Image: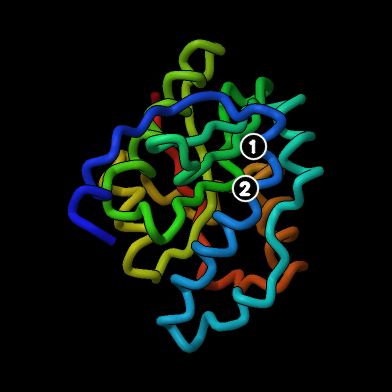
Amino acid sequence: MSADANKCACLIRQAQIADAALLPEIECSVAKTFSTDPSLHFILDMPVMSVEQHLDFMQKGHVLVTECDGVLGGFLVAEAMPDESCLHVWELSVHQDFQRRGLGRKLLDAAADIAKAQGCTQLSLTTFGDVLWNRPFYESCGHQVLPVDQYNARFRSIAELEESIGLPIERRVTMIKTV
């Protein structure tokens, strides 16, 4: 990639229906990042969010994308949990070709703005706690690990779901940010 590619103009916007078909490929690209850790190779074989799931989230939640000079570089999928005054981030993916440019941080900032606008006081997510580019990144964005003994029913349900699809639950953490 040329040096000019790192200087592309990127904007954050709500995903459009036509974007849904492009989002699984971005998530697949991100999965390849995990191949550098032999204990996480299984992620390459895991299913990514389908086009239909993205379309569903566009209807019931929020799907934000980063568009860089007409190309989608990343996305964030979130859903409001109004009973908890929380916006939960289900997925944050930035294509390998667009990583290390602040796009993930910009997507999280946009999600925090949505949370505030909806009257939410927290932004939550789950991630790998021991992968060098996961937990430290979210901590640098203001998220803190929620101890397992403080999980509510929703966080316990998410942990069970993640375990059921094959994620090593002992390596996963729930993170919260006050917005």
Bin the neighbour count of mark 2 within 10 Å (Cα to Cα): few under 14, some 14-19, many 20 and up: many
Q: Which mark is residue 166?
A: none
Q: Are marks 2 and 1 in contact (CB under 8 Å)?
A: yes
- Quarter holding the C terminus is top left
- Quarter holding the N terminus is bottom left
Instruction: Please tell me in which quadrant of the rendered image residue 7 appears.
Output: top left
Q: In the shown orientation, is residue 102 left or right of residue 50?
A: left
Residue at horizontal 30%, vertical 33%? 9
Residue at horizontal 47%, vertical 41%? 71
Amino acid at circle 2: Leu
- Counting from the top left corner in percent of width and height, residue 50 is at 76, 51
* Type of colouring: rainbow
- Counting from the top left corner in percent of width and height, residue 19 is at 64, 37
Foreground residue among 46 and 97? 97
Instruction: Residue under label 2, please give it.
Output: 23
Residue at horizontal 64%, vertical 71%? 167
Q: In the shown orientation, is residue 26 left or right of residue 10?
A: right
Q: In the shown orientation, is residue 73 left or right of residue 149?
A: left
Q: Is residue 61 above or below residue 156?
A: above
Instruction: Residue under label 1, please give it.
Output: 19
- Counting from the top left corner in percent of width and height, residue 139 is at 31, 48
Q: Is residue 159 above or below residue 72?
A: below
Foreground residue among 33 and 85? 33
Amino acid at circle 1: Asp
Residue at horizontal 35%, vertical 33%? 10
Q: Secondary structure at mark 1?
A: helix
Tell me the distance, in whole angstroms, between the alpha carbons under discs 2 and 1: 7 Å
Q: In the shown orientation, is residue 158 left or right of residue 175?
A: right
Q: Secondary structure at mark 2?
A: helix
